[in-house]
Amino acid sequence: MKIIEVNFITSGVKLSQYPEDALPEIALAGRSNVGKSSLINAMINRKKMAHTSSKPGKTQTINFFSVNNKVMFADVPGYGYAKVSKVQRAAWGRMLESYFTKREPLRSVIQIVDLRHAPSQDDVSMYRFLKHHNIPVIIVATKADKITKGHWQKHLKVVKQTLNVLPSDPVILFSSETKVGRDELWGEIMRRVSD
Ligand code: GTP
Ligand code: MG
């Protein structure tokens, strides 16, 4: 994918604040700190467009980026972050639930897991939730650079089995550091937004 133009559009925490000029939209989902914002930067060839941090809980609003005026990426706060208050966590939960179930331009969710570890119970619940709502999902197993190549397939198998991934949902090995998987992921995204 040749990136010609990327624009930060807006941030929001409720449906009325999200962009209205309906480009087909792809949203990120995954645990705090798994690498959602980094994946967006890797996809759009920008180092700091989506804000990242080594500490979990960096992204707190839904942030929208348009790419080539063709597709909108929605960067979403992570789940499973223990260090925020119960009230804050419940508010994020409601924000994510209403986004994923009511956001009209949403075409597909990129659910990110860490290739190094078996998906968590939260990851399994998230995938089930998305499938319950019939949302097409692309599973991305990221941080592949942290594992030797010879172990990739073994770890991918654990990801597929733990999440119980449906055959219609692709599983892509990825690294925001080395960009492995980037072209394959762009292929899946464009296939889903041009339908
Ligand atoms: P929240 O916004 O808190 O939900 O986190 P996030 O999922 O957006 O994670 P973020 O992109 O901020 O990345 C978290 C940390 O993981 C940062 O220190 C990144 O540099 C690192 N990271 C992300 N992707 C990769 C990757 O593919 N490889 C390596 N080695 N590190 C990564
Ligand atoms: Mg983030």
Image (spheres, rainbow, N blue to C red):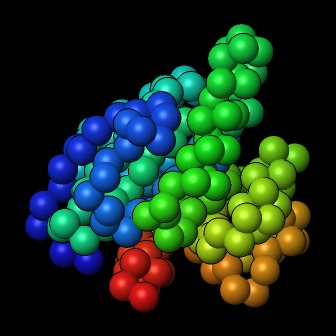
Foreground residue, 3 or 132?
Answer: 132
The quadrant of the image that shows the N terminus is bottom left
- Please identify the quarter of the rendering in which residue 31 is found: top right
Q: Residue furthest left?
A: 4
Q: Quadrant of residue 77?
A: top right
Q: Position of residue 71 (x, y in %)?
A: 31, 67
Q: Residue at x 19, y 66 (%)?
A: 69
In the picture provided, is 149 more to the left or to the right than 80? left
Residue 144, position in %: x, y?
58, 60
Pick the front one: 139 or 11? 11
Task: Give how far across and how far down residue 109 sits, in percent.
Answer: 57, 63
In the rendered view of the protein, which quadrant contains the C terminus?
A: bottom left
Q: Residue at x 76, y 15 (%)?
A: 86
Q: Residue furthest front?
A: 16
- For image coordinates 69% across by 86% down, the residue present is 168
> On screen, 66 above or below 13?
below
Say which residue appears at 23% left-offset and 44% top-offset: 8
